[in-house]
Image: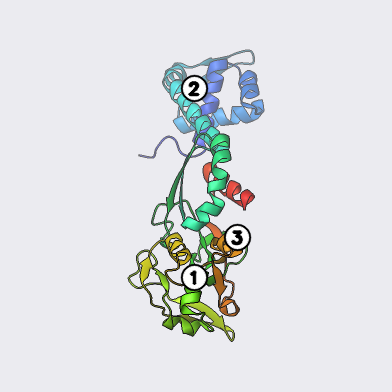
């Protein structure tokens, strides 16, 4: 059997209840913000839909029929509850609330998420940020994340990507003590003769091959050395301790370079690459909580 209510029928049912409460088309029309003629058409359409007369109308009065009163008493609480539910949903649309799940590379979180947390918690008390810090490249949608912050070269093509900063460079660095003991490489390929501090992408078996740029193209150097880590900060600390040559994003080693505790190496072969981006799945309607997070990160970038 065809269901009674579908789509626009809610408006007819709401009109019926409003007239049943006011027993006046003009008063009910004023309350609903429509014209009396439009309201009359809605009620007439609902009567045709139900297949029975619901009101007795005269030029001076409006009264429910027996069938109309029976229906009115049964549907009035449901319409009221439905209206409250819709209002509650609309309040969620207007006031950010709920959980936003974010996946971020560790270095990106330190730069773009940590600074916004105090103000965000104050301004959006009903939003929970569920943040996973991980240098692995995960499928944002399959992983159940709402957004991710990562470098541009590992963003899926169907994602919306918002640039957060300038291009980045990776550079080789070593401590003055290491260079005094082992010398300085003159070309990236000389690194095969040095003690290098390697880093492994999470989920990968082999360490990352260091990338350099020459004559318009990139090339890799498979370095070797006494240490393999899955945390880039640990590799930087090892370089500071003179254990070997490290390879890091330039802004991560800017301070120790400025302080003279690390020395940049092979810079002519260190070219920039796409920097960090905030990315999220393309969607027709964005949850207010996610929009609030995106706006906060972009404002602080």
Mark number for residue 54? Answer: 2
Marks 3/2: CA distance? 60 Å
Residue most extreme to the top: 60
SS type, badge 1 = helix
Q: How many discs appear?
A: 3
Residue pictured at 58% horizontal, 62% vertical: 254
- x%, y% of residue 15? 55, 26
Q: Nearer the viewer, mark 3 or mark 2?
A: 3
Q: Nearer the viewer, mark 2 or mark 1?
A: 1
Q: Earlier in the sequence, mark 3 or mark 2?
A: 2
Q: Which of these two is toward me, 233 or 277?
A: 233
SS type, badge 3 = strand
Residue pictured at 60% horizontal, 79% vertical: 268
- x%, y% of residue 165? 61, 60
Q: How many residues crowd around disc 1 within 10 Å: few (fewer than 14), some, or many (20 or more)? A: some
Q: How many residues crowd around disc 2 within 10 Å: few (fewer than 14), some, or many (20 or more)? A: many
Asked whether residue 174 appears in the rendered view, the answer is: no
What residue sits right under mark 1 in the picture?
177
What's the image's color scheme? rainbow
Residue pictured at 45% horizontal, 68% vertical: 242
SS type, badge 2 = loop
Position of residue 273 relative to residue 5, above or below, is below
- x%, y% of residue 40? 60, 27
Q: Which of these two is toward me, 259 or 192?
A: 259
Tag 2–tag 1 contact (CB < 8 Å):
no
Marks 1/3: CA distance? 38 Å
What residue sits right under mark 3 in the picture?
163
Marks 2/1: CA distance? 94 Å
Asked whether residue 301 appears in the rendered view, the answer is: yes
Residue pictured at 50% horizontal, 63% vertical: 158
Q: Nearer the viewer, mark 1 or mark 3?
A: 1
């Amino acid at each position: 059997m065809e269901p009674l209510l579908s789509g626009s029928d809610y408006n007819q049912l709401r009109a019926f209840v409003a007239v049943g409460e006011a027993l006046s088309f003009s008063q009910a029309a004023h309350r609903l913000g429509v014209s009396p003629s439009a309201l009359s058409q809605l009620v007439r359409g609902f009567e045709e839909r139900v297949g029975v007369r619901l009101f007795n109308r005269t030029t001076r009065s409006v009264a429910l029929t027996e069938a109309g009163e029976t229906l009115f008493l049964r549907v009035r609480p449901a319409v009221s509850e439905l209206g409250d539910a819709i209002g509650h949903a609309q309040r969620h649309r207007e006031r950010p609330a709920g959980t936003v799940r974010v996946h971020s590379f560790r270095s990106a979180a330190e730069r773009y998420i940590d600074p916004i947390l105090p103000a965000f918690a104050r301004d959006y008390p009903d939003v929970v940020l569920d943040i996973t810090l991980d240098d692995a490249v995960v499928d944002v949608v399959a992983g159940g994340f709402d957004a991710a912050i990562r470098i541009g070269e590992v963003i899926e093509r169907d994602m919306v990507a918002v640039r957060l900063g300038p291009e980045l460079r990776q550079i080789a660095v070593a401590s003055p003590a290491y260079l005094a003991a082992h010398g300085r490489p003159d070309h990236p390929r000389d690194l095969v003769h040095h003690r290098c501090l390697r880093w492994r992408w999470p989920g990968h078996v082999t360490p990352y091959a260091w990338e350099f740029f020459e004559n318009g193209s990139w090339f890799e150097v498979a370095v070797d050395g006494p240490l393999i880590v899955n945390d880039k900060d640990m590799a930087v600390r090892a370089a500071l301790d003179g254990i070997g040559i490290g390879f890091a994003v330039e802004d991560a080693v800017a301070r120790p370079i400025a302080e003279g505790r690390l020395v940049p190496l092979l810079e002519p072969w260190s070219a920039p690459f796409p920097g960090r981006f905030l990315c999220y799945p393309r969607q027709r309607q964005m949850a207010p909580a996610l929009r609030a997070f995106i706006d906060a990160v972009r404002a602080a970038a």
